[in-house]
Every structure is written in structure tokens, then in C-alpha cells.
Image: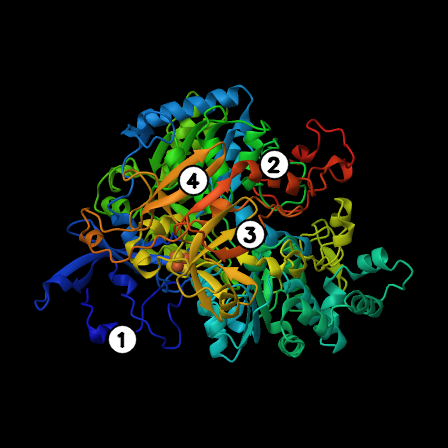
Amino acid sequence: MKLLDRKHAQLPPVARPAEAAPNGEMAAFPPAEEWDDWVEYDSAAWPHRVEKHYALLPTVCFNCEASCGLLAYVDKDTHQVRKFEGNPAHPGSRGRNCAKGPATINQINDPERILYPLKRVGPRGSGKWERVRWDDVLADIGGRIAATIHADRHDEILYHVGRPGEDGFMERVLKSWGCDSHQSHTNVCSSSARLGYDLWSGSDRPSSDFANARFILLLSSHLETGHYFNPHAQRIVEGKMKGCKLAVCDTRLSNSASMADYWLPTLPGSEGAMLLAMAHILLARDLIDRQFMKDWVNWEDSLRALRPQAEPTLENFVGLLKELYAEFTPEFAERESGIPAARIVEIAEQIGWAGRQFASHVWRNTTAGNMGGWQVARCLWLLHVLTGSVGTRGGCSPNSWDKFVPAPYMPPPPHKRWNDTLWPIEYPLSHHELSILLPHFLKEGRSHLEVYFSRVVNPVWTYPDGATWMEVLRDETKVGLHVALTPTWNESAWFADYVLPMGHASERHDTVSMETHAGKWISFRQPVLRTLAEKQGQHIKRTYEVNPGEVWEETEFFFELSWHIDPDGTQGIRKFYESPDRPGEMLTLDEYYGWMFDHSVPGLPEAASKEGFTPLQYMRKYGAFAVEDGIYEQHLKPVPDDDAGVVVDGVRRSGFPTPSRKLEFYSQTMVDYGWPEHAIPGYIHSHVHPSRQDPDKNEFVLMPNFRLPTLIHTRSGNTKWLNELSHSNPIWINTRDARRLGVGMGDLLRLSTEIGYFVGRAWPTEGIAPAVVGCSHHMGRWRLGNENAPSKWTAALVDLQEDSGRYLLRQIEGIRPFESPDPDSKRIWWSDAGVHQNLCFPVQPDPISGMHCWHQKVTVEKAHPEDLYGDVFVDTNKSHEVYKRWLAMTRPGPGPDGQRRPYWLQRPYRPAQEAFVYPPGGGGATRR
Ligand code: SF4
């Protein structure tokens, strides 16, 4: 036991198993040996030295997908969590966090959090609730699900998830129920980039080795907010400290762009043209890796399809590439993107110089903004293929090499269903479910929901066309039962039947892993108060016994719910939730995770035993485990003759999980599914291409999908520190445009979309290109009442007027100090709640990837006399018409052999192969 004083704080960390901070970087982590009884002086007692004794218990941040490690400091006297700091034993985050990690303390202490299970009283959406018992909740919901399954209406059960924060658990649950019922938020997030990557490599994300790169190109704001924010940001900075150059492509001068060596402010949607011009330069200057291309690109198939007369040689393929991309000169790209041709050449040369140490990333940004955005990911990967920077140190690997998902205890077999509501035949290539279309499908009677779970998702606010969501969520003929599993109140939970409080980061179990670098790791989220109580010898049956109020966790909830669905085991569901050692009794959390850590995590049992721990004890102690490090060139691995693979250099190697086992430049899949014009990486004019705007009518492109580094989505609402940092989303407008419109700082603007308008404040800046306006999507929370509603730290009180599908949302009051057990709530000094722009966006699903194309064509004008700040108007009749127009752009399946979707392409919660056949029951229908 040591006191944390200045001298001690300078000691190197004793963190295991990962090095917490190599090379003498700033570090002050309590030694792991002392985590059971760590002593600090009580700051409130200063100047007296009063010792406080803490148990330091690791868990995992739940505020973004990065899943950084946290150490909870639990006061051993009061059993209260006092603060969260970084966990040095976590291989992804290495003891570091962004502002949102430590702010978890606000979430668990928030005076407005939901503490007990609630059931609505009165009509749905009337804002009245009564407290109910967990047992009654389980009996009611379990009974309804059982009846729905019994009636063979499995597709009417839907589990809609925003931030999963876990790997594999819900897949096991839904498969055990035999349901194709998983609906993610991915098509408002990343389905477009995923399709681009998947078509090339059979993996839907890159794992970029930023720390070892010589040149990094980001089509996103990774340093400040992006995908795997803190783990990536720290490795990008590490790379830069070793001399790597960084280019950031972002229309807006993001914090990331401001830290880069090159800022590339492309016009929205033009990024593909710029990337292909870089490919053009790499080819023209012969800055290409012929050996890599010869071995690992499907160039023979490509030549056969595109130049059948040509002799099958690599040189002919290189010649074909030059021909195909001849039109993408730097000058052409300059006209499209606004980036000077000389700068494009310079970046291309830097990429060529970096060669196999070129790293990049695109995730949301342009891919999520534009129709055809999935092709941008393909164009970006083309640069990797040309430079051979795939799977290399300092390059990019397929994410599947670096993400580790352990097999669970008793995995259920794949189900045999295909849910057309989630995977409609119009989108055979969509990457993830068409969740944005659900309300329109319900409106049209194309589907009906008996039980709808919304879990850490808030579609009324985070999705486009939220008013249509409101319309269907309050209609009991369309949604029979809405169960909101959520740690905090949100706009969608207002329209629920049950609101069930689920734990924050330190109040629940999950296992989670992310591809943060060229290594594999697994982390373990745990309810720290339960862990401490059990260490002290208490017997805890359910996590809600120790969490605040009766806050529970999904793992135990779904164990129990599954028993209620199949109480006597006759449906074949209960067996998946029975103890392996105590027949007929329910599986416990220790048994479930203990089995996983004992059997499915290579190296963990040995590491644990060296310290005298069981694998579960080890994970409860350290919270994470590095499974493997330095993972490169997995495609070269020799495989047995009867395994899937490809012969390269006379050796059968594993290759990539594509039909050819190589990286697919030419995609036969695109041809087979009706899109031959997109068989190769190409440039698609976005729906907001400048040719579709009329500047004389004050038409602009609105970029509504950028993040702020200090906010999440719904869950940051209940996080007072973060709201104090960020509480406004002004409209970025170029100073030249502002002058032309006669608009000054803070003036009210009305931005009209195809289905409505919103009113916000102007922020003239040089940090955004002319003819483009930008507005962060993080703000504009609202509440229809004062109690049991989105947080007063962040949400404006609003009036919602409705007239035959036309809605006007108007703020009654912004943010005000309020009475609560937290004295800080009386000290609120900000008043702005921002504006909720998403409400007046129609759904715009890309006809191929299914991704909602966030960018909007808007007309910008000064606010009208009747307008007030924060007004949002929307007409859902019009939004339904826009939905039909975009739906008509699709080319429905099935594809060859009557497949609804290419079997080789990734699909979450993958059903058995027979379910891929369309129509149901098979028959091998041809393309419609
Ligand atoms: S990047 Fe920040 S919000 Fe995301 S997991 Fe890490 S600490 Fe949490």
C-alpha cells in the first residue's frame, strides 16, 4: 500500500499485461498489486491528510465503439464509485481516455437517470408512468414473445440496437429464439464504407497500423472524434512523432484537419474523383508494387472480364488500369473537388513514397454523406492495392485479423429465417439492415411488429425523418409493444410501453474487442459494485441488487427473459440458459463468462495461472487481455489443401475471404446483382453533386453528420461535464456566402430541405468551403415534458404541433438551472440546446449499400419573421413520397441461383444457407 504523492506519481507504472506507457511517456498509474487497496488523500479534507481507501476495478467505457479501458475508483467505506481513470492494462487504450471516458461518473450519478422499471399509464406518448416489478416485466414480455414465436410470427419480434458495446451475446440470444430479428443503426452510420471494403477483401473495415505508417490519409476526423477515437488518435500521434506525415480530407476545418500536414477540403461527394486521380498518378509514375498486385489482386479475372482479347499478363492489367483511370487527371479532380491538382500530385507521391507503410481510414464522413459513398472506400483501398500496403507493418489490414470474438458457451445453430423487413429484396447488397425504412414499411402495412425492443438507440432523434418514427411508435396497431432498454431517457423512449433501466459502463457485463492496431485483444466490462461486494463475500443473485435503484444489465435480463419464453424447456430455448454444472438451474454470469475465458481465449488460462488466478479472476482483476500482437500478412498463411485458400508461389495460402480468395478489383458480384457499371472502383456523382445545385437560388449542400469530440449521441445528454463543454450547434457558413446573404454572426437562418426546414444560428467562418453549410448532429435534444423525459442538462422543453402529418416543433424554453440532488444543476450557465436538424431530413437510402445519404440539398435564407430559434417543421406526407422515390432507384434481387444476397458477402446474425434462397422455400428464382 502506497500513498499517491508527487514522488510516487513519477514512478513507472506496474501495469500488466500490456505496457501502459512505453519509453517514459507521461504515466502515473497505481501499481496493479495495489488495486485492491489503493490509498489517496481526500481532497475535500485538505489541508489535512485524510486517507481514502479505494478498490480499483477495471471496466470498459460504453460511450463510443472504441471500448477503452476504465479503472473505477470505488470507495471501500461507502461503496460509491468516486471517479474513473484509464486502465493501463487495456491493450487498445493503454491507460488513456478521451473526455467522455471519465465523464462516465456523471452518467452514474445523474439525478435524472432512470432507476426503476417503468410501465406506461394512459395512451402511448402521454408521458405518464408507473413503477413495476422486474418479475412482472419478465412475465409480460416473455409471454408475448412466446405467443409470437408459437404463432410462427418470429419476424414480428425486433431488437433494434444503436451502440452494441458487446460482441456475440445478443447474437446468441436471438439465434436461441430462432429469430432473424437483429436491427442495427448501421445504415445511419457506416454501411456504405463497409460495402466498399467488403467487396474488395471480404472484411468490412480496415485495421490501420497508424503507429508504424510513413504516410496517413484520413477521410474522417479520427484524431478528434472518429472511429475508435482515442485508440486510433494516440497511434496516429505516435506515428507522427516518428516522422509520419498526415493528410486529412474533410470539407470542414475539423480539429483533425488543423493538426494535419495537409488539409484537403474536398467538395462534398468529390472524394472518389480525388482518390482516383491519386491512383492515376501512382500508375503514371510507376509507384506501384507489381509483386503484390501479381500475387494478391484478381487481375486475371479482371482482364478476362474487361479485356477478353488481351494476353493475361500483369503488364496488360497495369495497362488496363492506366486506361480505365486515364480520365481521372489531377486537373479533372481539381475541377470536381476543389483541391489543387499540384496538391493531389504531391499527396500521391507521398503515398507512393510510403509504399507498404501507407495507412488510411474512411468510415462515416463522405461515405455516410453521399449517394455512391461506398465507392469512395473502394477507391481508397485501390491506393493500398497499388502500393502493396495491405496486411503490412504500417499499412492496413482487414479488420477481421485484429478483432477477437471468443466463442460463447453452447452457441445455438444458425436460424433458418430471413426477415424481409430488415433485409428487403430491393437491397440484395445492402450492408446491414434497412433500419431507416422500418417506419415506412410499417406505414405501408408491409410489416407489423408485435414486440419491438429499442436498446441504446433513439431513432426519433438520431435518425432522419423522426416524425415518421413518432407516428408509427405511438400507433399500437403497428407496434404492439415497445420495450425501451436504456440507461437514460430519450425522445424515443417517451413512446414506449416499458422503459427498463440498463446499466452504464460500470454497471454491466460485456465482452468486447476492437481492431485498434495490429494486435488482438479482448476486454471485459463488469458491474464494479457487484464485483466488490462479491470479493467481500456477499452473495449477489442479480446485478440490480447492487446497482443504483434497480438498474439491471442485459445479460442477466435476457437469461431470465429466455426462461420466461420457454419456462418448461419444450421450445428448445431454455437449454441455452441452463447451467452446465447444475442441471435444470439457470446459467449464472460467472458460469457464462468463466466458460468463455476458460475455453475460448488462447493464452488467457496460462497467463492467469501464472498469477494464481482463474481466467475469470484474471479478467475481473485486469479487465483486458492481449491475445496476440504484431499481426501482419495473415493472407500468406499456408493452409491445408482441403481448406479454402489460393495457391500463390506454389503454396496454398489462406488469402482473403472473397470468391477468388484475392483482393477483388473486378467484382463479378456487382455484375451478378445488376450493377455491371460499378464492377470496378469508380466515381459516382453524389446526390448533392454541384450540378444538382443552383447557387442563384441559394442552394447549398448541408453537411449535417459531423461529430464533436466531447459528445456521444443520446447518452451524453445526462453527462453534465460534457454538456458544459459543448452545448451549441451553429450553422457553419463561409464568410463569402454569409456576406452575400447579408448574414452576420449569430443571425437566424432558415435551412429548407425537401420535406421541411429548421432554424439555426449562423457561424460565418473560413473553415468551410463556399456553397457548403455544416451543422453538428450532436445537439438539438428536446423533451415534451419536465419529468421522465430527456435530460434538462441538454434538452429544450418543446411544444409539438401537428396537423395531418405536418409538424412544427418549437422550443418553449432552452436550458435552465434546475433543482435536483446535484448542486451543479442549479449552477447551469448555458441556455442553448441547439437545433434538431435530423427531423426535417427525408430518408435517402443509397440504392446499393442501403446507407442513409446524410448530405442534404438545402435552400439557405434569412429566417422569416415568424421563425424562432430551434424551430423545426416537417411534413411526413412528403417524406413518404421521398422514400418511394429512393426505393424506386433500387435494382431488386434475387441474384444467381435465386439468392437474396451473395452468400460470400458478410451478413450480421447470419442465417443458415437455405434462408438465402428467394422466394421462401427455394426454387431458384431468377433476377426480377
Ligand atoms: S474514445 Fe472516449 S468515449 Fe470512446 S471508448 Fe474511449 S474513452 Fe470512451
Identify the element where label 1 is drawn. loop
Asked whether residue 290 is in view, the answer is: yes
Name the residue: 77% across, 63% down: 650
Dot 1 corresponds to which residue?
10
Q: Give the percent coordinates (x, y) of residue 879.
A: 56, 40
Left or right of 268 on screen, residue 677: right
Question: Marks 3/1: CA distance?
Answer: 47 Å
Question: Marks 1/2: CA distance?
Answer: 54 Å
Q: If the image is split into quadrants, where does the N terminus sit?
A: bottom left
Dot 3 corresponds to which residue?
854
Residue type (three-letter) at the residue carrying disc 4: Arg
- Does ligand 1 reach within 8 Å of label 1's beta carbon? no
602 lies above or below 893: below
Residue 665 occupies quadrant: bottom right
Instruction: Give the camera-side residue of 913 and 894.
Output: 894
Left or right of 674 on screen, residue 410: left
Name the residue: 72% across, 59% down: 682
Q: Which mark is residue 911?
A: 2
